[in-house]
Image: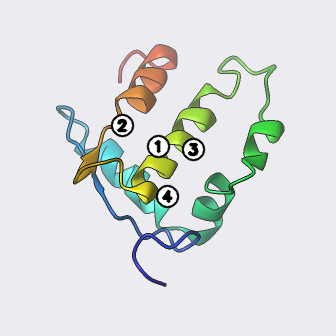
Amino acid sequence: GAAGEEGTGASTVGLQNLGNTCFLNSCIQCLFALPPVASYFLDEQKHYIWTLDRTSRMRGTLALSFGELLHRMRDGGGGPAVSAAVLKDRVSKFAPQF
């Protein structure tokens, strides 16, 4: 598919390096490139929100942050790169070593 086309995982923008986040950024880009993952989180109806396990310790915050980030990556984010800071902060909240 064309760059930025939903379901292809093709990104129109990159991810900003927030200082030692290149490994995280690589993982995000790999997940975004997987059509089943991209289409699940880029669903315009955001059905994934209704399947979150709100009884878990994280209460779906990682999935929500990841979905929002994929939408910004696909939609361009208004510049050449978007920040994964919110996702990184959520990961750090539950795994302080990050």
Q: Position of residue 2 (x, y in %)?
A: 43, 82
44 or 62: nearer the viewer: 44
Label whose residue precedes the other's in the sequence (2 or 3): 3
Q: How far separated are the C-alphas under marks 2 and 3? A: 11 Å
25 or 67: nearer the viewer: 67
Q: Is residue 5 left or right of residue 98?
A: right
Label whose residue precedes the other's in the sequence (4 or 1): 4
Label whose residue precedes the other's in the sequence (3 or 4): 4
Give yes or no for contact between labels 1 and 2 (Cβ–Cβ under 8 Å): yes
Circle on res. 69: 1
Render colour scheme: rainbow
Q: Nearer the viewer, mark 3 or mark 4?
A: 3
Q: Which quarter of the image is occupied by the C terminus?
A: top left
Q: Nearer the viewer, mark 4 or mark 1?
A: 1
Circle on res. 84: 2
- SS state under label 2: loop
Q: Position of residue 17 (x, y in %)?
A: 20, 40
Query: Disc 4 marks which amino acid?
Result: Leu
Give yes or no for contact between labels 1 and 3 (Cβ–Cβ under 8 Å): yes
- Per the image, the residue denoted by label 3 is 67
Q: Is residue 35 left or right of residue 43?
A: left
